[in-house]
Image (spheres, grey):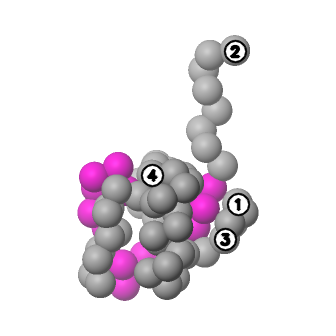
Amino acid sequence: MKTGHQLVEDSDFEEAKKMGYFVRAYQGNITIYPPGKITGFSNDHIAIDEKRVFRDANHFEIVDPPKSSKK
């Protein structure tokens, strides 16, 4: 999976969770939560860093990991 890949199927969410990809949930152009890792999912929700968002009301995509403050 690459940055910008939209997650739709259960297999997409399972792979993103397994591989530790950072995911953002958004509605239109508005990000609902800061990007984070998938911690769980079901038929009706996706949990990103333990915060549940409704699966039907949002879109989900792979994003780059946040820049580290350590150099």
Circle 3: element type:
loop
Residue at coordinates 69% horizontally, 15% vertically from top-left? 71
CA–CA distance in space, label 3 to label 4: 15 Å
Q: Which residue is mark 3?
A: 5
Q: Tell me the magenta residue range.
A: 48-63
* Label 3 packing within 10 angstroms: few (<14), some (14-19), many (20+): few
* Residue at mark 4: 37
Say whether disc 3 or disc 4 marks the residue closer to the N-terminus.
3
Dot 2 or dot 1, earlier in sequence: 1
Q: Which element type, helix, strand or loop, lies under badge 1?
A: loop
Residue at (47, 71) in percent of width and height: 13
Task: Tell me the kind of residue under disc 3.
Answer: His
Find disc 1 in the rendering and name its residue.
Answer: 3
Say which residue label 2 marks. Answer: 71
- Residue 53 horizontal side relative to residue 37, left or right: left
How many marks on residues?
4
Which residue occupies the foreground of this view, 13 or 4? Answer: 13
Check contact, mark 3 vs mark 1: CB within 8 A. Answer: yes
Asked if residue 15 lies in the magenta stretch, the reply is no
Question: Viewed as shown, does residue 70 lie left or right of 34?
Answer: right
Crowd around label 2: few <14 · some 14–19 · many ≥20 (10 Å): few
Can residue 60 be seen in this snapshot?
no
Secondary structure under tag 2 reads: loop
Three-letter amino acid code of the residue under disc 4: Lys
Answer with mark 4 or mark 2, whichever residue precedes in sequence: 4
Residue type, numbered disc 1: Thr
Circle 1 crowding by C-alpha within 10 Å: few under 14, some 14–19, many from 20: few
Magenta region, main secondary structure = strand
Is 29 situated above or below 48?
Answer: below
The disc, 3 or 2, on the residue closer to the chain's N-terminal end is 3
Q: Which part of the image, by quadrant, shows the N terminus?
A: bottom right
